[in-house]
Amino acid sequence: QVQLVESGGGLVQAGGSLRLSCAASGRTVSSYAMGWFRQALGKEREFVAAVKWSGASTDYADSVKGRFTISRDNAKNTVYLQMNSLKPEDTAVYYCAARNRFSYGSTINDYDYWGQGTQVTVSS
């Protein structure tokens, strides 16, 4: 089993930045693809970003391209999401997910393990 714990969420003004972290435990996730999803109040959970097991390849939702960066440190069993130029529409609970495959996916069903989420609120 893999346990994922997100941190780094909070309240930030529009235009600001936050860095989310996702620490994995239970087993190493160095061979897992990792992803970030988000769910705004009253909306479905949506894909944000994903990274291949090696970190060599990434994917982003169109809405965050050029503003968010996903990265990983396999030695620390941790994945990050750097969020810059934040907008009020980025407000959501952000979830980390692990996929027991080398390559990533962009749908909820592609992932095997989920964290509890961290709230990000962007004020205008």
Image: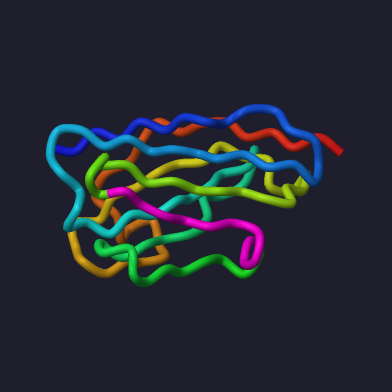
Q: Please name the residue shown 59% across and 56% down the image.
A: 68
80 w.r.t. 1: above or below:
below
Q: Please name the residue shown 12% across and 39% down the image.
A: 27
Query: In which quarter of the view is residue 28 placed?
Result: top left
Which is nearer the eye, 68 or 41? 68
Which is nearer the eye, 66 or 5? 66
3 in magenta: no
Q: In what quadrant of the picture does the N terminus appear?
A: top left
Count of residue discs: 0
Q: Which residues are magenta?
A: 64-73
68 in magenta: yes
Q: Please name the residue shown 54% across and 47% down the image.
A: 38
Q: Main secondary structure of the magenta part?
A: strand
Percent of width and height locating residue 50 = 41, 61
Which is nearer the eye, 55 or 109? 55
* Horizontal arrangement in the rendering, residue 83 relative to residue 1 (left or right): right
Q: Please name the residue shown 47% across and 56% down the image.
A: 70
32 w.r.t. 38: above or below:
below
Query: In which quarter of the view is residue 113 placed?
Result: top left
For the view shown, which residue lies furthest in the right direction? 124
Percent of width and height locating residue 15 = 79, 46
106 w.r.t. 28: above or below:
below
Q: In what quadrant of the picture does the C terminus appear?
A: top right
Percent of width and height locating residue 26 = 14, 33
